[in-house]
Amino acid sequence: MSQASYIRDMMSDPAPNLATGPSEVASFYAGMNVFLTGGAGFLGRLLIERILRSCSEVSTLFLLLRAKKGKSPQDRFKELFDDVVFDRLKREKPGFAQKVRLIEGDVGQIGLGLAPEQRELLRATNVVIHGAATVRFDETLRTATNINVRGTKEMLRLAKEMPNLKAFVHISTAYSNCVREFIDEKFYPPPIDSDKLLNLVEILDDAPLQHLTPVLLGKYPNTYVFSKAVAEDIIRRNDHRLPVCVVRPSIILGTFKEPIAGWINNVYGATGIVVGAGVGLLRTLHCDPEMIADLIPADYVINNVIVAAWDLAGVRNSNVSNADSSKNPEIDEPPIYNVVSSCQKPITWGKFMQHIEDFGLQIPSMMCIWYYCFRLNKYEWVHKMYVIFLHLLPALIVDSVARIVGREPMLWKAYKKIHKFSAVISYFAMQQWRFNNDGVMRLSAKLSPADQNQFELSMENFSWEEFNYYSIRGGRIYLLKDSLDTLPKATVRYAKLRMAHYAVVTVIWGMIFWLLWTFIKVSGLW
């Protein structure tokens, strides 16, 4: 099968429409003005595409973009729609561009960096989806606070200027309260008061703030989840003056169905493990293979965000018409939705990686630099032994040869980054959390049959095997940029890598046994 025909198949629905009829969710968005932050990110692109395609009667989609990496907001806006993820939208809704409007700003700045005329323009917003965030686990506390905490506060301040606001959806993370073993769909006390944290960031210089960071984080593993926990408290303290809700996804993977199966554009989280192992760089991970890997396909997250706004607006309207709204339990606190897989379709890390291995070895890539040899090691000392013999020793040998032939050594530096990344992932791979997602299930039950088919929330009918089949192919095409047309050539090349792998392994084990035998003889133990 050629690359083009395969992508066309991936863009079509894996299953036929089981229910037809008008979409209540799409009808809600008809004529609405939607303001989206984080539109250039992974989830942001999917939200843009889905809203414009499945809720095509939306009036205007405002996109907040900032300058980044030397590119202006206008340049980033022009390049945004060149992504393959928008190809289906271009085919089905060719006039979508008329509905999209660029808003120049930055959630990390006071006032969001908005010009007065743009702030006035946004008063017409009906739905806010706040997805902008720094998702780097090793981000400085200052940057994480300014973007994830102050940005949320500034967004709520802006939302209060919107007289016709019907819904404000804040995208958080299921691990914002990872210091707890059981995480319900409710707010928890923050690690620090948001105003105190913002004051600290303003008062302290970089050096003292960096020194204080471990003390502030406490049991929180990184600045990302810490800042997200504080940001949720800002949402909670909204005093219900605004229609707000929180969507908490777990570890996000590529897409399952919409708009294209297997699409992914980053190597964060579990995707980084898959890519690192697939190209032959990553050989070991400190991970308990029996632990549940709470992974979630990106399109399930997108569906929850879109539907949550619809439901929030409906609940608020019913409350307005209710003379005694205090009797309605649905407005006691802003609703929270834990978008997780472990409640309906749990999968262990071991089973997940077994799927990856089975499907990945069927379609080796030209980007592979070594043969696949990856292990999940529960015991840290075993993991460290693997690191020494399968990461550091080969890196030392390869870089030494590179120096001899006059090339720049790179492998040792690469493994330093890989080990830093894998140490962060190990925190989530060596622990087990229990989640409650009753809110998501109630939300799913509210949908009409047509909307349940269009915006699937429940994972009852989800198949990890089918997902991973598409995920591996999507990673090859969209991350490694390796066309499936190269598969015959890649298969031959990979067979050579396998033979070289076994030859090197034989030599290494021979060296180990020789060293042991020499030690035994010299020590007189034999």
Image (tube, grey):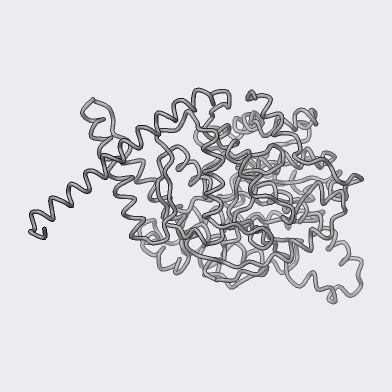
Residue furthest out toward the front? 526
Q: In this view, does 60 lie to the left or right of 500?
A: right
Q: Which of 456 and 120 is in front in this view?
A: 456
Relative to 442, is 77 above or below? above
Looking at the picture, tell me which residue is in the foreground, 21 or 16.
16
Please state, as top left, top right, bottom left or bottom right, where the C terminus lies in the image: bottom left
Determine if residue 360 is in view: yes
Tell me what residue is drawn at x 66 percent, y 40 percent.
Answer: 45
**Left or right of 415 on screen, residue 37:** right
Q: Position of residue 342 (x, y in %)?
A: 63, 61
Q: In this view, does 120 lie above or below 504?
A: below
Looking at the rendering, in which quadrant would you find the N terminus?
top right
The correct choice, above or below, for 354 with respect to 498 in the image is: below
Q: Quadrant of residue 333?
A: bottom right
Q: Which residue is drawn at 72% across and 46% down?
A: 35
Residue 215 position, x and y percent, is 41, 68
Q: Nearer the viewer, residue 65 or 454?
A: 454
Q: Residue at x 80, y 56 (%)?
A: 166
Q: Relative to residue 71, is residue 508 drawn left or right?
A: left
Residue plotted at (60% across, 36% down): 474
Using the rendered view, name the quadrant where residue 234 is placed.
bottom right
Q: Where is residue 285 in the image (x, y as percent from the top left)?
A: 42, 53
Residue 490, position in %: x, y? 49, 26
Count of marks, rendered view: 0
Q: Is residue 202 visible?
A: no
